[in-house]
Image (cartoon, helix red, strand yellow):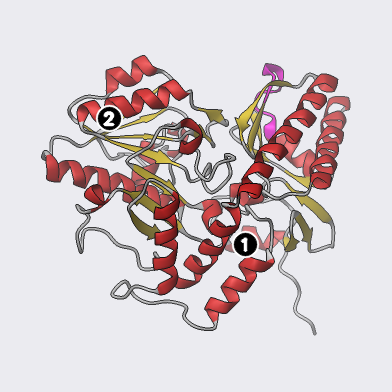
Amino acid sequence: MAAQHPDRALYDEVMVPSYAPANIIPVRGKGSRLWDQQGAEYIDLAGGIAVNALGHCHPELLSALTSQGENLWHLSNGFTNEPALRLAQKLCEMTFAERVFFSNSGAEANEAALKLARRYAWDKVGEGKHEIVSTYGSFHGRTLFTVSVGGQDKYLDGFRPAPGGITHVAYNDIAALEAAVNEHTCAVMLEPVQGEGGIHPADKAFLQAARQLCDKHGALLIFDEIQTGVGRSGMLYSYMTYGVVPDVLTTAKALGCGFPIGAMLTRADIASCLAVGTHGSTFGGNPLACAVALKALEIISQPEVLAGVNARHDRFVKHLQDINARHHIFSEIRGQGLLIGAELIEEWHGRAKEIVTATLEQGTMILVAGPDVLRLAPSLIIPEDDIDLAMQALDRAITKLLDA
């Protein structure tokens, strides 16, 4: 007898209930399309939450993975490896960075950045310079340290006491930032575009003020580019769109286009404080992950790919504006590149998930960014026809909900 395919009900029997996955189970993907166990086809505008930047099963990424897999899978961190060295060199060449630390995820990259900031301040000044300033609405990961620096209490409920020495201010509030940063501050951590907090782009003046305050008080400016990085913003990294250079940058998600990898980028003088034994990762710099990420970076950094991100942004926004003209359901459409948010009007607050579910029933996958905002984070090379078809599906879903 042939083995039965595991179904959605099995999730509730064998998995920790920390997620609430959809009722369908995708089993195959190609480009911007996915197919479930029953063979139903979907257009993917979720992108694995801004991860699948080149869609599903991109042939060049698949080739990079299989080629590396035939040679070397893993080494301990008592050794280095060629893919890791090539990827680190490429990241340094293409950004402000001079040194790279590899991890497995964005949370781990952020954990490394925060530990780096405290260690750097400890070495330069002493234990008293340890305070971290972040913003309300931010999201930096799910470790206890990163979730504490993130500015959303709901992710800390039930896990306190949280690490101390962390202050939050309102996003884009320069006066509040000026009041919070002082001689005891070791780092200011910001997302150039708040992702989970609702797709809020930073004001350039806010990032410039953060840079000036960090310089004044000897603190490190950390940009969390887990979601905005690797082409998502229309530039390789979002800091390039603002012209504000951080001291530390974290990147993950699209860096591996679906293969788990994260990285922390910084300058040599800062990196030197993480001497041998001060931090580590068993799988960080894994040859398989680095080989895939190197190929992804090579493809996404091409000028025509980045230009295509901005063109696709405009196409999505035009569709969303047209939908809003018909249904008057969005209070604001905002974002950067192919990280786009559509905030629902007040009467529809709390119902973003309903629209996600209704749109899935119409054959298109989208995301939320909190209870009030729809989020689109598709492949950076999604075909224009798929954009049009997916937006038609969203329109049908909204029409159905409004008519119910």
Question: Could you tell me the amino acid type at mark 1?
Answer: Glu
Instruction: Kindly report the distance in space between the C-alpha atoms of the residues bearing marks 2 and 1.
Output: 49 Å
331 in magenta: no
Label 1 CA crowd tier, 10 Å (few <14, some 14–19, many 20+)? few
Please say if the residues under marks 2 and 1 sit with CB atoms less than 8 Å apart: no
Q: Residue 252: give x, y in percent of width and height.
A: 48, 52
Would you identify the image quadrant in which residue 256 lies? bottom right
Does the segment drawn in magenta span residue 346?
yes
Q: Residue at x 45, y 33 (%)?
A: 138
Residue 69: x %, y % from top left: 54, 79
Element type at marker 1? helix
The residue nearer to you, when weighing 115 against 403, is: 115
Q: For the magenta stretch, what is the residue range?
A: 343-352
Q: Residue at x 28, y 17 (%)?
A: 179
Disc sitting over residue 234 in the figure: none
Q: List the single residue furthest toward the left.
A: 126
Element at label 2: helix
Q: What residue type is labelled 2?
A: Cys
The residue that disc 2 covers is: 214
Give the quarter of the figure containing the C terminus.
top right
Furthest residue in direction top, as rendered: 175
Residue 13: mark in rendering:
1
